[in-house]
């Protein structure tokens, strides 16, 4: 249902079946497919394509030439009813592409809340982006990539399919991510390697001295102790008994599929 109070520019095309909230704004030369839902106060500036089974939440701002919910680039995809789900308060800049999921994944590509997707960022099929993340200009995610909250991906960086980026990670520009990046870590290079902890970022987000100390200890166990990853996990489990924050590392390692950068 297209609410009669919604602003839809006369040069926009909104197909029958789309659900447009009364306070949404659809600018000139946009195309909205029949299975799209757009929430309250979301603004499509102009020349935006939203297609497929796509839901976009409230208070998003989407700039010109963005393409959301289109057919993915997986050659196995045969038109199955897969989806894109986008949360609230995201800023999606010019020429961003977000492709629908596949049957081989979770059938959905998800973007959470309060994210900044800069010019020409690409989110491939079956990716999951958390909250408060930044993808800088030309950042490219392969299929099935998962990015946890508050991560920053630098410009011109490519992330290999199935990689997992932990919370509060900072990935430097022009990097190639071929393995998982644990929480709180700074990664840089092609292929990316760890360069310590994102201490300044953690301070800006309110981590106190005690928390930073625990994170440093856990980082040293993983990267400076000379232990195998299994040995490091055992020591982290002991540390987590006294410091709950260490479970952030353990949870990440339990979900890792490609191994971590080391």
Image (cartoon, rainbow, N blue to C red):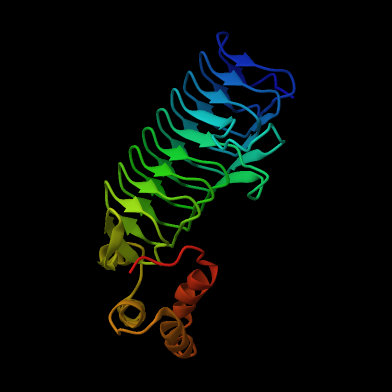
Quarter of the image for residue 196 reads bottom left
Using the rendered image of the protein, determine whether residue 201 is visible from the camera's viewpoint. Answer: no
Locate the N terminus by quadrant: top right
Q: Position of residue 167 (x, y in %)?
A: 43, 62
Q: Position of residue 226 (x, y in %)?
A: 30, 84
Left or right of 28: which side holds 183? left
Left or right of 143: which side holds 195? left
The residue positioned 49% from the left and 90% from the top of the image is: 241
Query: As rendered, which of 118 and 232 lies closer to the eye?
Result: 232
The residue positioned 65% from the left and 48% from the top of the image is: 104
Location of residue 37 with respect to 240 vertically, above or below = above
The residue positioned 30% from the left and 80% from the top of the image is: 220
Using the rendered image of the protein, determine whether residue 221 is visible from the camera's viewpoint. Answer: yes
Quarter of the image for residue 80 reads top right
The residue positioned 61% from the left and 14% from the top of the image is: 13
Left or right of 258: which side holds 6? right
Location of residue 173 with respect to 210 vertically, above or below = above
Left or right of 60: which side holds 179? left
């Amino acid at each position: 249902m297209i609410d009669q109070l919604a602003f839809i520019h006369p040069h926009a095309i909104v197909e029958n079946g789309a659900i447009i909230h009364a306070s949404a704004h659809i600018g000139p030369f946009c195309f909205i497919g029949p299975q799209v839902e757009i929430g309250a106060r979301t603004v499509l500036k102009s020349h935006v394509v939203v297609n497929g089974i796509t839901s976009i939440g409230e208070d998003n701002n989407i700039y010109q030439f963005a393409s959301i919910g289109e057919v993915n680039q997986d050659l196995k995809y045969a038109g199955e009813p897969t989806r894109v789900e986008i949360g609230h308060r995201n800023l999606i800049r010019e020429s961003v592409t977000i492709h629908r999921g596949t049957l081989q994944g979770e059938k959905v590509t998800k973007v959470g809340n309060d994210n900044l997707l800069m010019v020409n960022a690409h989110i491939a099929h079956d990716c999951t982006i958390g909250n408060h993340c930044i993808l800088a200009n030309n950042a490219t995610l392969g299929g099935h990539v998962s990015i946890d909250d508050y991560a920053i991906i630098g410009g011109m960086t490519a992330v290999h399919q199935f990689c997992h980026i932990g919370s509060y990670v900072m990935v430097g520009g022009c990097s190639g991510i071929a393995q998982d990046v644990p929480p709180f870590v700074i990664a840089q290079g092609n292929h990316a390697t760890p360069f310590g902890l994102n201490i300044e970022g953690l301070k800006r987000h309110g981590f106190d001295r005690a928390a930073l100390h625990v994170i440093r200890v856990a980082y040293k166990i993983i990267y400076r102790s000379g232990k195998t990853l299994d040995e490091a996990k055992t020591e982290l489990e002991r540390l987590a008994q006294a410091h709950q924050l260490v479970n952030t590392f353990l949870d990440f390692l339990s979900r890792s599929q490609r191994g971590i950068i080391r």
